[in-house]
Image (cartoon, rainbow, N blue to C red):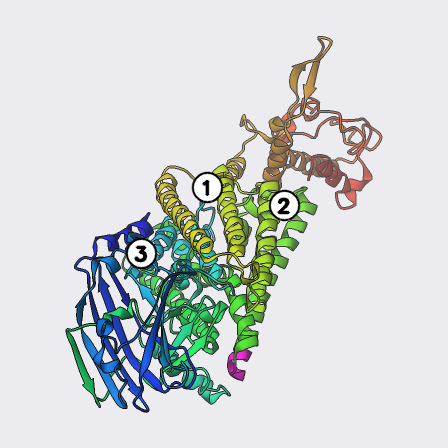
Amino acid sequence: MLAISALASGVVCDNILSTIGFTNCGPNEAIQVQRVDIAYNHGNKTITFDVEGTSTKVQNVTAELRVTAYGNEIYANTFDPCHRSTFVSQLCPVPEGTFGARGVQEIPAEFADMVPNIAFQVPDIAAQATLKLNSKEDGGESVACIQSRVTNGKTTDLAVVSYVACGVAGLALIATGVSALGAVLSGGGAAAGGGTPSPSFTETVGWFQGMAMNGMLSVNYPPVYRSFTKNFAFSTGLLPWSQLQQGIDDFRGATGGDLTKDSFELLRKTTLVFPDESTSQSSEGFMGAKRALQDFSVLLARQIETSVGGEGGGSGGSDDLTKTVEGIQAYVEQLSVPQSNTFMTVLLIVAIVVAAIVVSILLVKVVLEFWALFGSFPQSLAGFREHYWGSIARAITSLILLLYGVWVLYCVFQFTHGDSWAAKTLAGVTLAIFTGILAFFTWKIWSTARKLKQAEGDPSGLYEKKEIWVKYSLFYDSYKKDYWWLFVPVILYMFAKGCIIAAGNGHGLVQASGQLIVEALLLGLLLWKKPFERRSGNIIHIVIQVVRVLSVACILVFVEQFGIRQTTQTITGVVLIAVQSALTGILAILIIWNAVEACCKTNPHRKRRKEMEKMQRDMDTLTPLDARNSLLLDRKDPELGPNGETTFSMASTVEKRQSIKARSATPDVYDKAAAATYNSYRHKNSTSNGSNGSYRALTTQGAPMYGHQRDQSRENLVSGAAPVGQDLERQPTLPNVGSGGWDSSYDNGGAGYSGYRQYRGF
């Protein structure tokens, strides 16, 4: 919605068509044009122009003007500058040396009415004018040719759109806590991004990255969509920064780079020509020559200032260059980033971000240390104060996971289009480090899950055990417990997408087809598993992925091999802008909604973990007479059988597991009673050898100690215990489970007692 508002802001302006530059479209012409600035004001039906050029000799010429819009020729005219009705003194004849003409002329109504109103409303109109000057003496040979793309001043490449997108991403960062700051404020209790609802910061930036990467394919984009995708370059680490580019050029020049073919200074003077023959200039605005005319009948003016022999201070010049670009090169060089500087630009931007994260976390650490000296800070920050290095590691790992797809793209592009051996080495090293870090965490999570499954029957400890959750949850925190592994195909998806776009650069059909397959596979996985913990998360991710698949399918319309008309391509581009802008607005609304909802609801994984921790703390405070005694947790509850008889069912598996875990942490009071009874009996038996055993002893001749009668309930063991004797100072006795003398194993290290403990579940 914000993007549409930004576009609508230009409607209130005057209806003006103008040229923003030109290119010389013919080789070795005798006439060279250095300046063509023409503007048509539809409100007062006037044309303002400023033309300068040079000629090697005096020539009589005819002029041929053609104007096309969206691939269709809408105007064509040939006129003689020396004819009385179309007289132009500076072209009748063309003088030798430098010449110029500037002025304002009114356009007759019959010509002004030929311009459709839509030309003043649609941003980035695909209109182009071509002017040729043909010699009268040499059989109509072309002596000059200039081309220009016409603009109405409205474009989808607006700084405000980038600012709004940055604001949405920043809002997601604050609302969801997917950052190092989020890890700091969580007090170490959760990893960065722990359990955030969708759309999170990572998902929002990933959406922006997808739109930017769509603009990098080697297809014939309409100007309106090409300009739109530039607004999201920031999400991939590309920023126009002239000082940074000059520094990278110096680095490349010292490490094998060829600055005569590709450099920032060279790019400033180069006009970019796209596959649809439209042209553009960099974001820095330093490009020279471009486009020509909106209507060269402007030169039949009477109110014209002319000059001969001037110095020609035009916007173009003989030093201006043109270069045909496509794909990744076209995308980055629109942002004043030479293609050979692309990887180093992103590397330095990411290095600055990492440095800012580290400094911010260390600054918080310093503040907490001073706080601790002069007062007491919140207990929730105590964990961060002790484990701040872990917070730094989590934040950097989150950044790697966020940028991995575009990092693969830029590294592969550097390998294939870079010219500096040092930059290629850095690309290989960083890609290996990033991949190694993700591979390490993948191995650790899988091995941890396998151990948990062997020990407990399922890997739910990844969510329930706090120490594991803190280390690894940033990879799987939004997934259900059964689908914790889904982060692996997501990483593979990012890797494949980056490789396809970079390795297929220059082959639009291969790029679009490969990307469509990858996007469709991920969509199928989401529809099949619906892996996210929250129902809203499943819906949002599926909708985003559906839009991605449809977007790539629409990009097939721009593939040159299919030969689809430019009008259809432009309509498709406008539809893509509308759909992607609408989804971006919906994501922004959902981010705000989730921020409000987060104040009222708790992450389900965190909530369950806290409940289990509370239950275990309660188990640690059990007493023999406590109603929560562990023996009662596994009681047989009476139920009515199918024939009316009374049956008993054991407590749930979850209750049993929780009971056993609690008893493993704190020795059961009955075990303490049994140990006390045994020690007391041994003491008395050693002082009176002739004792005939007023106490019945535990023996192997009685009931089996364990393993053979698991169907006997623990309540029977308790009810069968012998009464407490007075001479033992009311010490509890062992359960009466048999008859006979003492088992000799008690005198051999207490094996019988160990057997009793094994029966009890320890």
Q: Marks 2/1: CA distance?
A: 19 Å
C-beta proximity under 8 Å, tags 2 and 3: no
Amino acid type of the residue tagged 3 in the rendering: Ala
> Callout 1 environment at 10 Å: few (<14), some (14 to 19), or many (20+)?
some
Please state the horizontal and vertical placement of residue 417, each as a whole percent of the image: 53, 77
Question: Over which residues does the magenta segment extend?
Answer: 419-425
Query: Residue 586: x percent and y percent?
Result: 39, 44
Secondary structure, mark 2, is loop
Using the image, determine if residue 361 lies above or below residue 79: above
Q: Which residue is mark 2?
A: 459
Within 10 Å of disc 2 (Cα), the crowding (few <14, some 14-19, many 20+) is many
Lower sequence index among marks 1 and 3: 3
* 2 and 1 marks in contact (CB < 8 Å): no
Main secondary structure type of the part rendered in magenta: helix
Question: Which label's residue is closer to the chain start, 2 or 3?
Answer: 3
Instruction: Tell me where residue 34 sits by quadrant.
Output: bottom left
Q: Which amino acid is tagged 1?
A: Asn
Q: Which residue is mark 1?
A: 603
Crowd band around label 3 with a 10 angstrom C-alpha radius: few (<14), some (14–19), many (20+): some
One can see residue 395 in this view: yes
Front residue (pair 283, 620): 283
Query: Label 2, label 3: how many angstroms apart (C-alpha)?
Result: 62 Å
Residue 428 occupies which quadrant of the picture? bottom right
Q: Is residue 213 magenta?
A: no
Q: How many marks?
A: 3
Q: Which residue is tagged 3?
A: 119
Front: mark 1 or 3? 3
**Left or right relative to 231: residue 497:** right
x then y, percent, for residue 547 = 49, 47
Q: Is residue 58 above or below residue 178?
A: below
